[in-house]
Image: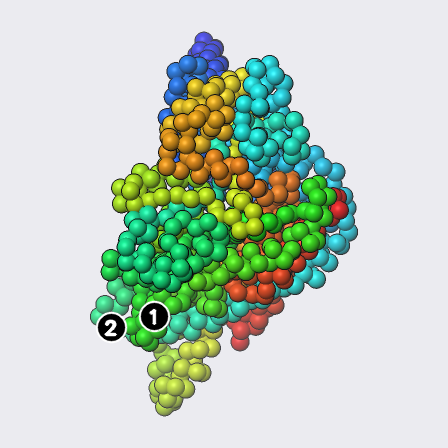
């Protein structure tokens, strides 16, 4: 029986065969990856370089006919010396820290509880993950109603439990509750995501390890701290990385809930950046702002990934 | 094979030609999605019949209107042939070449700006302000006004209690301070077994809400943007003692006379609060008044309207828009034909009768005009004293700075009125320095 590869080679037209025979494996490999590299350069790298270039100018995208001036580091200096922007960064850090804290704490606890075998386990898991299946726009809108002082369920529950009149405070208004209100909504929505990743981690631990620990008479408490936590930690850190990056660029849900208010109390850096870039049209300035945010996220993520790799190597 | 290819090419060519022809016989008009836009759809059917041009409409909800339309203009898009854009966009639209300058067209077609109310021509059509350079035809006059529950005001027990407390009859307020007293009087009161509140006012943070609301008080106290027009000399004007007092007043109104949770409220929320029977008074644009009057639950005999009350001067915040031809249109002739048709006095009369606020003198100067609607007289009075926000090309920066300063002070309770206005001057100075105007 003739070799099919030989048959294919014989069927290949002569000039083409000659050309292909002249190419090395490395060249062929490059030919295959070249389109992807080209797309990456065009869609990711070139805009990044262009943004860096724009960040040193006073360019405004809504005034294409105006002369573009090179302003050196002026945009960067303005941003880094602007108290308002530092306040927005603090708001972002507050939102980031507390959402991650609550999501990890509740997500891990839920995963640990749901990892046990009991009747209705699957149904409960499905119910818990429902919030993360909703669109942020939907979540933002219906939580606005839940937080409404006169008809909202949240204020009603507070009145029922504490006796504080429902209409006497506004969760999204003044009084300092708004930053915590957006944390509650994000935690409600995304804790199931952390729970699912933790559940995957818990289910990846083989039973024989616990059996060996039982034989060694290790207590449940000791098993939890010396076996469960270290083996789930890489999964947990991965969840924190995903959620951290997502929440650093949080926009839609918070805009729908508070619009950045009251005042600037929930004005996250991403919302401020959007206003600078596409409402005020300060393209050069907002490019510098974006680069500063990019460097911050990139730097923090790099340090974090190194730590994650170290944990995985242990 | 060749014959098939030829047939396919011919079919493609015919369909492309057909599309081009269809394009030239269609127009797309862009505006905000609100009651007057629906009236304009009905009105434009006459234009379709007369011209044979099919009208398409692109209406965007108010909170996204500026974002959506300015992005469209800025990106050189061809979505809109005609645009009814906000008055504050005029500077940027004229200087960036987004709108067609209409002077030659007006001259050729005999359309005179003298036929329109001067305040509307100034605000909606000219750039630089007040010069005879026209980029729009005044289309929809508007100002921020007030409406109230006439049936509640008329109740004898309420009248009696109010008179005992304030020593005067409960009636439409004749000053901003009277308005505050009435709002405070109704705040938390039980009416028909339901807790009601004083007034619904604009406090929205994201777009323009709180600025449009608070300027109603600022203008009434005599607020000016500059010491002399065109000088950008804001010190002592923007942060004058009267302006400080006006801002303190608006904060007090918000704190002591509005329903709970109305800390990010604009047009929709104001209408909802009134229609659901929560408030005794509410502010909103005159454009909504026909709809409010027609409301089966809170309209008719239960509602009445009043112009923004004066304090030191009579003044109202300007709304409304002019209609412009977008420079990128591929149907310039059709767009100009629409403007010509719309400028016709008979069309303007019909426009008013359908719920649009005409700016044409043929409508406004009619002796019977004030009797045509319960708010017609108030509208005329308001348009006589309207003031507008900056219309500079950098208006968005100026507006967002004011939104931030006002919301921080009024709603978030940060700092004093003096600090808010001093800070606003600093923000605006930076913008004008960047613009090369200072």
Q: Which mark is residue B322?
A: none
B263 vs A276, left or right, is left
Q: Secondary structure at mark 2?
A: loop
Specify the subunit that label 1 lies on: A
Q: Which residue is mark 2?
A: A118
Locate residue B140, reporting x and y percent: 48, 32
Q: What's the coloring here? A: rainbow
For the question of whether residue B193 can be seen, the reply is yes
Residue at (45, 37) in percent of width and height: B379
Locate residue B416, reporting x and y percent: 59, 64
B132 vs B331, left or right, is right
Residue at (47, 65) in percent of width and height: A174
Q: Secondary structure at mark 1?
A: loop
Quadrant where the N terminus of chain A is found in the figure: top left
For the question of whether residue B211 can be seen, the reply is no
Q: Which residue is mark 1?
A: A165
Residue at (24, 60) in percent of width and height: B193
Specify the subunit that label 2 lies on: A
């Amino acid at each position: 029986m003739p070799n099919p590869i030989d048959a294919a080679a014989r069927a290949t037209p002569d000039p083409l065969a000659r050309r292909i025979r002249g190419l090395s494996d490395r060249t062929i490999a490059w030919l295959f990856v070249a389109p992807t590299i080209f797309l990456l350069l065009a869609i990711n790298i070139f805009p990044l370089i262009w943004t860096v270039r724009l960040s040193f100018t006073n360019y405004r995208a809504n005034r294409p006919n105006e002369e573009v001036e090179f302003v050196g580091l002026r945009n960067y200096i303005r941003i880094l010396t602007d108290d308002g922007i530092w306040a927005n960064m603090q708001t972002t850090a507050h939102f980031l820290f507390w959402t991650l804290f609550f999501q990890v704490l509740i997500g891990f606890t839920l995963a640990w509880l749901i990892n046990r075998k009991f009747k209705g386990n699957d149904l409960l898991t499905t119910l818990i993950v429902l919030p993360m299946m909703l669109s942020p726009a939907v979540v933002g809108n219906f939580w606005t109603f839940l937080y409404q002082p006169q008809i909202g369920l949240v204020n009603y529950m507070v009145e029922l439990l504490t006796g504080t009149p429902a209409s006497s405070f506004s969760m999204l208004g003044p009084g300092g509750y708004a930053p915590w209100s957006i944390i509650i909504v994000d935690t409600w929505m995304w804790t199931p995501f952390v729970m699912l990743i933790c559940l995957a981690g818990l289910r990846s631990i083989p039973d024989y390890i616990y059996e060996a620990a039982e034989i060694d008479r290790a207590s449940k408490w000791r098993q939890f701290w010396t076996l469960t936590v270290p083996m789930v930690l890489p999964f947990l850190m991965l969840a924190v990385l995903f959620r951290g990056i997502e929440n650093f660029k949080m926009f839609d849900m918070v805009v729908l809930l508070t619009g950045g208010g009251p005042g600037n109390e929930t004005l996250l850096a991403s919302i401020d950046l959007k206003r600078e870039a596409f409402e005020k049209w300060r393209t050069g300035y907002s490019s510098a702002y974006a680069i500063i945010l990019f460097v911050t996220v990139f730097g923090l993520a790099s340090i974090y990934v190194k730590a994650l790799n170290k944990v995985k190597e242990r | 094979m060749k014959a098939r290819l030829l047939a396919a090419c011919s079919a493609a060519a015919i369909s492309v030609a057909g599309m081009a022809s269809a394009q030239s016989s269609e127009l797309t008009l862009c505006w905000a999605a609100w009651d007057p836009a629906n009236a304009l759809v009905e009105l434009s059917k006459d234009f379709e019949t007369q011209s044979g041009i099919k009208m398409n409409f692109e209406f965007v909800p108010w909170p996204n209107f500026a974002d959506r339309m300015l992005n469209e203009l800025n990106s050189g898009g061809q979505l809109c042939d005609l645009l009814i854009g906000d008055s504050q966009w005029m500077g940027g639209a004229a200087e960036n070449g987004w709108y067609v300058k209409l002077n030659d067209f007006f001259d050729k077609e005999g359309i005179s700006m003298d036929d329109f109310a001067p305040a509307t021509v100034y605000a909606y059509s000219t750039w630089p302000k007040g010069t005879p350079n026209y980029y729009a035809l005044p289309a929809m006059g508007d100002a921020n006004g007030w409406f109230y529950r006439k049936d509640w005001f008329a109740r004898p027990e309420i009248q009696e209690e109010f008179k005992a407390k304030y020593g005067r009859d409960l009636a439409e307020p004749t000053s901003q301070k009277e308005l505050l007293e009435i709002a405070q009087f109704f705040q938390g009161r039980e009416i028909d077994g339901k807790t009601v509140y004083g007034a619904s006012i604009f406090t929205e943070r994201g777009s323009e809400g709180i600025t449009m609301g608070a300027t109603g008080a600022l203008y009434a106290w005599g607020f000016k943007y500059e010491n002399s027009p065109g000088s950008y000399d804001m010190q002592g004007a923007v942060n004058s003692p009267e302006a400080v007092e006006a801002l303190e007043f608006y904060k007090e109104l918000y704190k002591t006379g509005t329903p709970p949770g109305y800390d990010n409220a604009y047009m929709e929320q104001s209408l909802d609060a009134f229609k659901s029977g929560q408030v005794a008074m509410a502010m909103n644009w005159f454009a909504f008044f026909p709809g409010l009057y027609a409301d089966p639950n809170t309209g008719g005999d239960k509602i009445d309207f009043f112009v923004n009350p004066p304090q030191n001067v009579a003044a109202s915040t300007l709304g409304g828009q002019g209609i412009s031809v977008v420079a990128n249109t591929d149907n310039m002739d059709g767009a100009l034909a629409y403007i010509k048709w719309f400028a016709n006095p008979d069309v303007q009369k019909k426009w008013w009768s359908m719920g649009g606020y005409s700016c044409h003198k043929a409508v406004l100067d009619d002796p019977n005009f004030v009797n045509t609607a319960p708010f017609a007289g108030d509208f005329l009075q308001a348009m006589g004293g309207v003031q507008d926000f900056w219309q500079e090309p950098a208006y968005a920066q100026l507006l967002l700075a004011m939104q931030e300063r006002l919301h921080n002070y009024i709603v978030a309770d940060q700092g004093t009125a003096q600090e808010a206005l001093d800070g606003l001057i600093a923000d605006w100075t930076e913008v004008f320095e960047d613009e090369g105007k200072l």
